[in-house]
C-alpha cells in the first residue's frame, strides 16, 4: 500500500475523501485539521482565533507538523489530509484538491450551519493567516503551488463517491496501489 497525502482548502472535500479512501483501501485516515482543532478545543477557542494566535505562537504549527512526521515515520499505509501534509510527508503520493470558491463556501456553510457571508470571511481570513505563517515558519512561499503535487483533482462538480473512484483510478494508474 502507500502513504497518500491530500491537500485542499476548506470545502474542497479532503476530509470526506480521506475517510472514503480509508474505508475503500482499508488503511488508516488521519487529519492534520483534527490535530489543530484539538489544540483549539484545549485552549477553549475557535479555529479562527487559533489561526490568529498561531501567528504569534509558531510552536502551534510546528507541533502539528511534528505529530504528522512522527506518525509518518511509524506507519506506512495511510491517507492523511492537511495543508502541509505534502511537506511533512515528502515520501507520500501528494494529491491537491481544488474547487471553485462559490462551491467551497456553499459546502462549508452547509456543513457548519453558518451564513455564506460569515463562512467566506472566516475561510478567506484563515487561509491568509495560514499562508503567511507557513512562509514565516517553514519558508514555503506558495503552499498550494501545483509543483508540490503528484496529481490535481477539481472536485467542484463531484460527490465523495466520484472523488474516491477518480483518486483510486489515479493511484492505480501511477502504480501507487
Image (cartoon, rainbow, N blue to C red):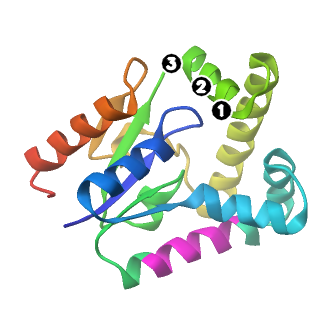
Q: Compared with residue 81, is residue 43 higher up or lower down, i.e. above or below?
A: below
Question: In this orientation, which residue lies closer to the viewer: 157 or 62?
Answer: 157
Q: Residue 171 vs residue 113: left or right? A: left
Main secondary structure found in the magenta portion: helix
- Of 121 and 22, which appears nearest the observer? 22
Which quadrant of the structure image shows residue 163? top left
Q: Is residue 31 above or below residue 100?
A: below
Residue 147 position within the rendered picture, expressed as x and y whole percent measured from the top left: 34, 43
Circles 1 and 2 in contact, beta carbons < 8 Å: yes
Residue on which disc 2 sits: 107
Point out the tag, 3 or 2, that comes first from the N-terminus.
Answer: 3
Q: Helix, strand, or loop for circle 1?
A: helix
Image x and y of residue 61, in percent: 68, 65
**Local crowd at mark 1 within 10 Å, few (<14), some, or many (≥20)?**
few
Residue at 26% over, 46% down: 150
**Left or right of 61 in this view: 99:** left
Quote the CA–CA distance across marks 1 and 2: 6 Å
Point out the frontmost of discs 1 and 3. Answer: 1
Mark 3 → mark 2, Cα distance in angstroms: 11 Å
Which numbered circle lies on residue 100?
3
Please state, as top left, top right, bottom left or bottom right, where the N terminus lies in the image: bottom left
Range of the magenta residues? 61-71
Which quarter of the image is occupied by the C terminus? bottom left
- The CA distance from mark 1 to mark 3 is 17 Å
Characterize the local packing of mark 3: few (<14), some (14-19) or many (20 or more) Cα atoms within 10 angstroms.
Answer: few
Q: Residue at x 29, y 75 (%)?
A: 76
Q: Position of residue 113 (x, y in %)?
A: 75, 28
The residue tagged 1 is: 111
Q: Quadrant of residue 64?
A: bottom right
- The residue depicted at 31 percent of the width and 65 percent of the height is 27
Left or right: where 81 falls relative to 74: right
Q: 167 and 139: which one is in front?
A: 167
Amino acid at each position: 500500500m502507500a502513504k497518500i497525502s491530500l491537500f485542499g482548502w476548506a470545502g474542497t472535500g479532503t476530509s470526506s475523501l480521506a475517510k472514503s479512501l480509508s474505508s475503500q483501501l482499508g488503511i488508516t485516515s488521519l487529519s492534520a485539521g483534527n490535530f489543530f482543532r484539538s489544540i483549539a478545543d484545549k485552549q477553549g477557542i475557535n479555529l479562527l482565533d487559533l489561526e490568529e494566535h498561531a501567528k504569534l505562537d509558531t510552536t502551534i504549527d510546528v507541533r502539528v507538523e511534528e505529530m504528522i512526521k512522527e506518525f509518518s515515520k511509524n506507519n506506512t499505509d495511510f491517507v492523511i489530509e492537511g495543508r502541509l501534509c505534502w511537506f511533512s510527508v515528502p515520501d507520500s503520493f501528494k494529491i491537491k484538491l481544488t474547487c471553485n470558491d462559490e462551491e467551497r463556501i456553499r459546502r462549508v456553510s452547509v456543513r457548519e450551519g453558518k451564513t455564506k457571508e460569515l463562512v467566506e470571511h472566516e475561510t478567506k481570513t484563515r487561509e491568509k493567516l495560514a499562508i503567511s505563517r507557513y512562509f514565516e515558519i517553514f519558508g514555503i512561499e506558495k503552499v498550494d503551488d501545483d509543483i508540490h503535487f503528484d496529481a490535481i483533482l477539481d472536485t467542484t462538480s463531484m460527490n465523495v463517491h466520484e472523488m474516491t473512484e477518480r483518486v483510486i483510478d489515479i493511484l492505480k494508474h501511477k502504480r501507487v496501489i
